Amino acid sequence: MVGLRRLIAGSAGTLLVGMFAGFVLASAVGVFIQDSGLFGASGESPIARAYMLGLLQRDPNSIVGIRPNQSIAQRAAELQGADTSRTTASIQPLSLTYIGGAGVGSYSVHIYAVGLRTAQGVDQFFPLALTVSGGKVVRSE
């Protein structure tokens, strides 16, 4: 009787460990396939990610190379706006979550959810969509 109990306990333990390992492996493979762009999924663009990080850090110099060329007046206004927002705004970025994206031809759209904390301590989320074409972020809304 003790031998049968030990056999059942050992089998149940082996089954549970196998199920857990299979779940972890299947999850890792699923994430890899989604991010690699196989089967039509486009995955997150490194250009879109770099743009979002520069935007949240309020550093226009870090995203100048991944935006279309701007006139000197547009660039000066952008730098002035970034300096003003850096000193006057007390909005704190909390999180950046890639929701998903799709591409057609040379265009791709990537959607993010950005978590912020306002000066009053209120946490908010807002969506931001980036359009990438030719290695540049051509639109954000």
Image: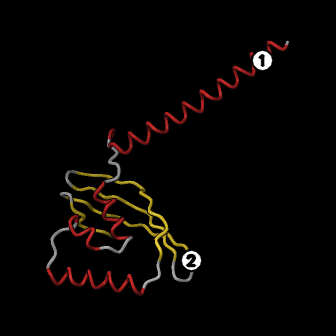
Q: Is residue 55 above or below residue 75?
A: above
* Residue type at the position of mark 1: Arg
Q: Secondary structure at mark 1?
A: helix
Q: Is residue 42 above or below residue 51?
A: above
Quarter holding the N terminus is top right
Residue at figure coordinates x 44%, y 39% from the top left: 30
Residue highlighted by disc 2: 122
Residue 110, x across and y down, in percent? 34, 58
Number of the label disc, if any, that sits on residue 136: none
Residue 64, x across and y down, in percent? 22, 69
Q: Secondary structure at mark 2?
A: loop
Residue 141, x across and y down, in percent? 33, 70
Q: What colour scheme governs how the chains and residues are painted in the rendered image of this protein?
A: secondary structure
* Label 1 neighbour load within 10 Å: few <14, some 14-19, many 20+: few
Residue highlighted by disc 1: 6
Residue 41 lies in what quarter of the image?
top left
Q: Is residue 81 above or below residue 10?
A: below
Q: What is the residue that sits farthest to the right in this orientation? A: 1
